[in-house]
Amino acid sequence: MCAATVLPRRPQRAMFSQPRRSPVAMDQDKDKDEVSMSPAGESVQGPALRQLMFGVIANLVALSPGMSLGFSAVALPQMMKFDGIDEHQASWIASLAAISTPFGCILSGPILDRLGRRVAMLAVNAPCLLGWLLLAAAPRHSGATTLIYLGRVLTGLGAGLACTPATVYLGESAQQSLRGVLVTWTSIAFSLGILAVYVLGALFQEHWRLVAGLSAAVPLLAGLCVLLLPESPVWLARQGRPAAAEASLRRLRGVAASADTPAHLRRELASLAVQAARRTVARDLGHLRRRECLAPLLIMNLFFFFQQASGVFVVIFYAVDVVQEAGVEIDKYLVTVLIGLTRLVVTIFISYASKSFGRRPCAIVSGSGMTLSMGSLATYLFCVNNKLLSDETIDKINWYPVLALIVYISMSTVGFLTLPFAMIGEVYPAQVRGLASGVTTCFGYVCSFIIVKLYPDMLEMLGRHGLFLFYSVMSLAGTFFVFLYLPETRGKSLSDIEEYFSNNGSKIKNVLRQENHVSQNQAGEMTILVNEDQFSTKLIVPDVDKYEH
């Protein structure tokens, strides 16, 4: 063993004289520390802005997959009108992207864990670029369906690859006060991509190939920008590369390589050393059977199921058709753009609101709003179909379907659409985060394929009002599930969340004592001696439980 880092002892007064603080109060204290002045007189707000910039770059990879999700909504009406695509083929064009997405999710986990977070983000762009080029090159005859199918499969594969890397990367790289905001930015990027393709579809209503060609520029730009990002320090530490982890963390926090290590950075390095001491990465599904993995896995998979069963992705894939089936009489492309814009604005709002209000309240409000909006729309359509309303009354309230759809989109974005993707970067232990995230998003998109593929059949079997009523009932069931089982992660560190699921408040110390040699002196410091084949260091950590993962 060799001595790599010795952290200064924390003052005894701070450890014994101060009363124990709640997690929220501790989080607020950290926020204050992070905007204070460093010893060199430089504001720490700079590193926060730096992390926000890296957050924007990391989530550029999700723009093209978002455009892929919304592409079928604007392209299918024109394909059916000008390219001879029938309803059966149209359902496959819409759903093929969803059926290939789970394979991308499965591939994403091993890439994340074995090759790194940055490589996983770079891997998103290749299938997206090739898929868009195939769609743009599809000829105007019956053989075009082969290229269209293949293009949709590839862009769907890219969507699967994009679901977790940016969220996991930012969850590991951002300081705790910013993590709650940054992990929701993948949903913002997806929403921005959906809006972008809706706008392009409205501008070029008869030229879906041109829309595909313009979309091909997005993954190319995103791939170049990702090269500017440092690798996740957590991943580097777990690979036994402490020097690279420190260099990455310094770059993320805006601390020069030659500068003295500030206190907040020393604390983060201590946390990295603890994680590196337990750096076993899950290689198979057997690791998911442990309580701290299995409990969040079941909860998140069910959350994704209710997300899909409530019709959230059906509205994305079939936006123009859904607007028409809802009885909207104004320009359906304009309403589609309004839906995309609403989704984007609410996603941006919820990325900050969830930090203030927490995950559970947002999810409960979301499910309740979806239930009411879909239920009221189903009631309206039932009354119209059965002539329970006079023509005069219908003319007076013909704006209601638009309002119901916009409320539904707004409410779904508040929680059910965005939070499942955000929380997979928080609830899983670090050693299975890539694998578990891949399994969860894979399951979610399998459900998405089934729901999207069955949309035409369910519409024919249940009718318009029956289909929207089904989405309302599933939204209500999802709301009850969230109320009963979804944990709150606001104000908690990643280690706090892991301990919640393991039901063992001493988890970190117990594991360290089993895997390494840990001694604790009277001042509350832990001396961690880690074997050289794991992570060559001797580290004195002031009360590990006080520091975030």
Image (cartoon, helix red, strand yellow):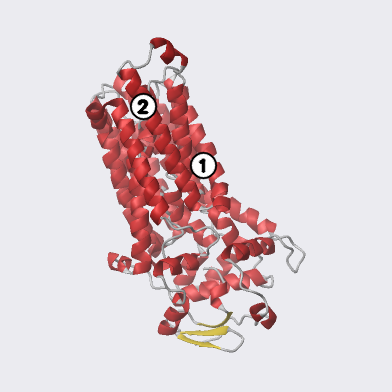
Q: Secondary structure at mark 1?
A: helix
Which of the numbered marks, if any, corresponds to residue 364? Answer: none
Tell me which corner region of the image, top left, top right, bottom left or bottom right, holds residue 349.
Answer: top right
Nearer to me, 260 or 443: 443
Q: Which residue is mark 1?
A: 347
Residue 358 can be seen in this image: yes
Check disc 1 and give the amino acid type: Thr
Check disc 2 and give the amino acid type: Thr
| Chain-order first, disc 1 or disc 2 | 1
Q: Which residue is mark 2?
A: 379
Question: What whole-number distance in Å separates the C-alpha atoms at marks 1 and 2?
Answer: 28 Å
Q: Residue at x 35, y 40 (%)?
A: 310
Q: Residue 519 at what x, y percent from top left?
A: 51, 88
Tell me which corner region of the image, top left, top right, bottom left or bottom right, holds residue 377.
Answer: top left
**484 above or below 212?**
below
Q: Residue at x 40, y 60 (%)?
A: 112
Q: Residue at x 42, y 50 (%)?
A: 420
Nearer to me, 481 or 152: 481
